[in-house]
Image: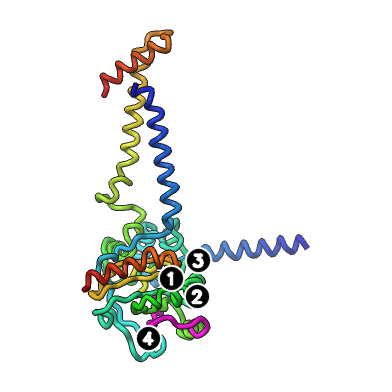
Amino acid sequence: MINRLLPLLVFIALAGLLAFGIHWNTHHEMTEVPSPLIGKPAPEFTLPLLYDSTKSLAQKDLLGKPYLLNVFGSWCPTCQYEHPILTAQIKPLGIKLIGLDWKDQADDAKRWLAQFGNPYDAVITDRDGRTGIDFGVYMAPETFLVDARGMVRYKRIGMFTPELVRDELMPKIAELGKVTQ
Amino acid sequence: MSRALALLLLIVALGSSSQNAHAVDPLPFKDRAQEVRFQHLAKQLRCLVCQNQDLADSDADLAKDLRKQVFDMMQSGKSDDEIKQYLVARYNDFVLYDPPLKPGTWLLWFAPFALVAVGALVVVRILRGRAKLPLAASEPAAIESSAIDSEEDW
């Protein structure tokens, strides 16, 4: 009996494997590398502010309240696509939004933000990209959700879409509220 | 007209090939040994931007930064393992072309051997079934004999 069914079982197992493969590939970004920083403290940084380079913002200054760190650059076309979503969907969530201007020229970044609008509560500049490397950034835009204790809770590689804001970011922010209260 | 176009294409092709030869930015190596060590290490690291290229090969901007970082760490006396650890802490095991053996990668390392073992078992079973088969067996007999066989094996 089992011998007769064996080819069928093998076929079903193989079909299952292929179905899983198709499912996996359509629901995952193939180039996405899961961040080892999730659940760990955000890397330390002290970076100059874009609009006042004599002042700087450090990771320690941000402790006490959760925030989003959005890595962007004026040279990054996808950031331009993400920009209206930052303004219309993410800013209204009420969480502090920090822009990390990554490997960019200050003048270009200012022009870019003047043209499209500035959704950020503060913009810091990472000219040589060292802080970006510390955060494991490799494909702008990237966004990190950091909690009040400075722990990285979530990372989005690539642009946010309205669906991702609703299905991933909002639940993660809601989770944060439960833990800190 | 087409000749001019061909000439233009040739010039472009030559230009780009000479550019490829200089894809790796010149770094001030102390000596030849350090350069060899750097190249050897960079070949074991994956470029995160063009994920099928190693760090030595990639012309991506981030790859340049990471090469610089690797070089600086080498200058400050860090070992190859420390440099790899630094990158893994930021970019995951994925930066290594040779993934480490740990519970999370067992499937990756052992699945091929497991599959070969399963395949060998199947082949052995089939061969045994055939050996026991009487010559010119009729169909029902064949099924019967392999059914007995399967009871012995399982």
Same-subunit check for callouts 4 and 3: no
Disc 4 versus disc 3: nearer the observer:
4
Kind of residue at disc 3: His
Q: Is residue A176 left or right of residue B25?
A: left
On screen, residue A2 above or below A57: above
Disc 3 secondary structure class: loop
Asked if the residues shown at circle 1 and circle 3 are in contact, with their CB atoms under 8 angstroms apart, the answer is no
Whichever of labels 4 and 2 marks the residue nearer the N terminus, that label is 4
Same-subunit check for callouts 2 and 3: no
Q: From mark 1 to mark 4, how far is it between C-alphas?
A: 19 Å
Disc 2 secondary structure class: loop
Q: How many marks?
A: 4
Disc 1 versus disc 3: nearer the observer:
1
Q: Residues in magenta? A: A113-130
Residue at image point 32% right, 17% down: B147
Depth check, front residue: B147 or A93: A93
Image coordinates for residue B87, horizontal then vertical, percent: 32, 64
Disc 1 secondary structure class: loop
- Name the residue beneath numbered marker 2: A75
Disc 4 secondary structure class: loop
- Name the residue beneath numbered marker 1: A141
Q: Quadrant of the N terminus of chain A?
A: top left
On screen, residue B146 above or below B78: above
Q: Which mark is residue A49?
A: 4
- Name the residue beneath numbered marker 3: B22
Kind of residue at disc 4: Leu
Question: Can you tell which quarter of the image residue A123 is in?
Answer: bottom left
Q: Chain of mark 2?
A: A
Whichever of labels 1 and 4 marks the residue nearer the N terminus, that label is 4
Asked if the residues shown at circle 4 and circle 3 are in contact, with their CB atoms under 8 angstroms apart, the answer is no
Q: Chain of mark 1?
A: A
